């Protein structure tokens, strides 16, 4: 069974740091883009950062200069290093991958991990 498992969410103070991890496991032939989205209560899901298989990255304006996305292709893992956290970063963070599974191209989502930033 293919699944994404996130970890690293926690409650931190303003200005603190967290590192989220997401591991993709199962029969995955190829992973293209990996990324992170977040959703705060009452808000739509927001794209936070993406990274292609070649290492090109893209960030939401709200996190540029504070968050860094990276990946380990050998381990099918994507990371999100979050520094200088602000209360407005509080949300459930979801990872996703664009991948080939059983010859079909699909988008997989993790179950989410809670990040809470307190002032």
Image (cartoon, rainbow, N blue to C red):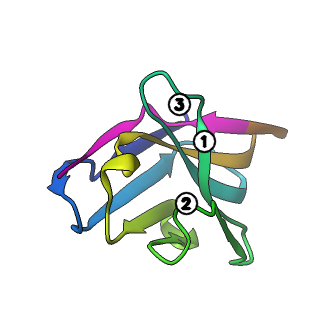
Give the camera-side residue of 88 and 50: 88
Mark 1–mark 2 CB contact (< 8 Å): yes
- The residue at the point 24 percent across, 68 percent down is 15
Residue denoted by label 1: 46
Q: Which of pointers 1 and 2 lies earlier in the amino acid sequence?
A: 1
Residue assigned mark 3: 1
Residue at 82% of width from left, 40% of height from top?
Answer: 105
x and y, in percent, of residue 80 in the image:
44, 64
Q: In which quarter of the image is residue 32?
A: bottom right
Residue 18 in view in this figure: yes
> At 53% from the left edge and 70% from the top edge, which residue is drawn?
71
Q: Quadrant of residue 58?
A: bottom right
Q: Distance between the residues labelled 1 and 3?
A: 27 Å
Which one is in front in this view, the residue at disc 1 or the one at disc 2?
2
Q: Please state the extent of the stretch shown in magenta in the rendering.
A: 107-119
According to the picture, the residue beneath numbered tag 2 turns out to be 62
Q: Give whichever of discs 3 and 2 has the lower sequence position.
A: 3
The dot on residue 36 is none
Q: Position of residue 77 (x, y in %)?
A: 48, 61
Tell us which disc is closer to us: 1 or 3.
1
Residue 65 image position (x, y, % from top left): 51, 78
Toward the top, the furthest residue is 42
Alpha carbon of mark 1 to alpha carbon of mark 2: how far?
Answer: 10 Å
Could you tell me which secondary element the residue under label 3 belongs to? loop
Q: Can residue 102 be seen in this view?
A: no
Secondary element type, mark 2: loop
């Amino acid at each position: 069974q293919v699944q994404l498992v996130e970890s690293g969410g926690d409650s931190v103070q303003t200005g603190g740091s967290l590192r989220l991890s997401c591991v993709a496991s199962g029969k995955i032939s190829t992973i293209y883009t990996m990324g992170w989205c977040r959703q705060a209560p009452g808000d739509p899901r927001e794209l936070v950062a993406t990274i292609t298989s070649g290492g090109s990255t893209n960030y939401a304006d709200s996190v540029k200069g504070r968050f860094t996305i990276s990946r380990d292709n050998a381990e099918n893992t994507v990371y999100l290093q979050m520094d200088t956290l602000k209360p407005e970063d509080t949300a459930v963070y979801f990872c996703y991958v664009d991948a080939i599974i059983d010859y079909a191209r699909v988008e997989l989502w993790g179950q989410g991990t809670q990040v809470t930033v307190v002032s």
